[in-house]
Amino acid sequence: MSVVDLRAETRAFGRARLRELALEAARQGVLDRGWAAVRMGAIAAAIGISRQSLHAEFGTKDDLGNALVMQETAEFFEGVRVRLDLHPGDLAGGVFEAVQYMVSVARDNPLLQTILTRTPANGGDVSLLPLLTIRGEPLVDRAIEILGDWVHEQWPSADPNDVRVMVESVVRLCLSHILTPTKSPADAAADLAVVACRCLRMAD
C-alpha cells in the first residue's frame, strides 16, 4: 500500500469513527432530553470536534436526525425480511412473524420507543417524529417495500393493486399498534395476518 493509499484509508477510518461517535451522542441526547433539545454544538463538543466539522459531515440537524433514524432501523428491517423468508408460500405465517417482530422490537427499542410514543398529550417530545412520518416516511416506505417485494416474489400472479392495498394496510396498521398499543404483539400480528389474507383472497 502506498503512502497516499494509507493516508486515504486513515482519513476514511477517521471519518467513519467520527460519524459513529456523533450518531451515538445524538442517540443519547434523544433518550436523555428529546430531539428538540439536541444541539449540534453540544454534540460536536461531546465528541471533540467543531460544530462546523459536524455540519460538514452531516449537513443540518435534520440530516443528522435522518442518519440516526436510518442507522437505528437498518437491523430492524433486516430482521423483518429474515422473518418473511422463513415462510415461503405462507402469507399468514410470514405476515404474522414479521408484524410480531416489528411491534415487539419497536416497543422494546429505547430510541424507537422514544421517537414513536412521545406525544404532546403525555408531555413528550415529538420533534423527531416528522423524520419518520412526513419527510419521505423512511420507516413506512421501507417496510412497505420489504413486504411488497416478498409478496411479489412469492405470488407473482397476484393482482398488483390488491398487493398494494394489502401491504400499505398491514404496514400502517402495524405502525398504529406500535404508536398506540392496545394488544400484545402476537394478537396484533394475528389480526394483521387475517387482514393480509383477506385482501389477497387467501385462506387465513
Image (cartoon, helix red, strand yellow):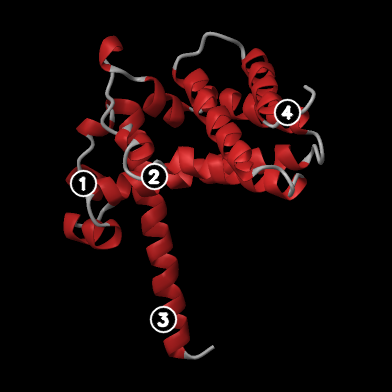
Q: Label 3 belongs to which residue?
A: 7
User: Dot 1: within a 10 Å radius of its alpha carbon, few (fewer than 14), some, or many (20 or more) residues?
Assistant: some
User: Between tags 3 and 4, which lies in front?
Assistant: 4
The residue at the point 53 percent across, 46 percent down is 74
User: Between tags 4 and 1, which lies in front?
Assistant: 4
Q: Secondary structure at mark 1?
A: helix
**The N terminus is located in which quarter?**
bottom right
The residue at the point 50 percent across, 41 percent down is 73
Q: Earlier in the sequence, mark 2 or mark 4?
A: 2
Q: Earlier in the sequence, mark 3 or mark 2?
A: 3
Q: Secondary structure at mark 3?
A: helix
Q: Secondary structure at mark 2?
A: helix
Instruction: Give the distance between the C-alpha atoms of the residues marked 3 and 2, in whole angstroms.
Output: 28 Å
User: Between tags 1 and 2, which lies in front?
Assistant: 2
Circles 2 and 4: CB atoms closer than 8 Å: no
Q: Earlier in the sequence, mark 4 or mark 1?
A: 1
Q: Label 4 belongs to which residue?
A: 201
User: Between tags 2 and 4, which lies in front?
Assistant: 4
The residue at the point 79 percent across, 39 percent down is 86
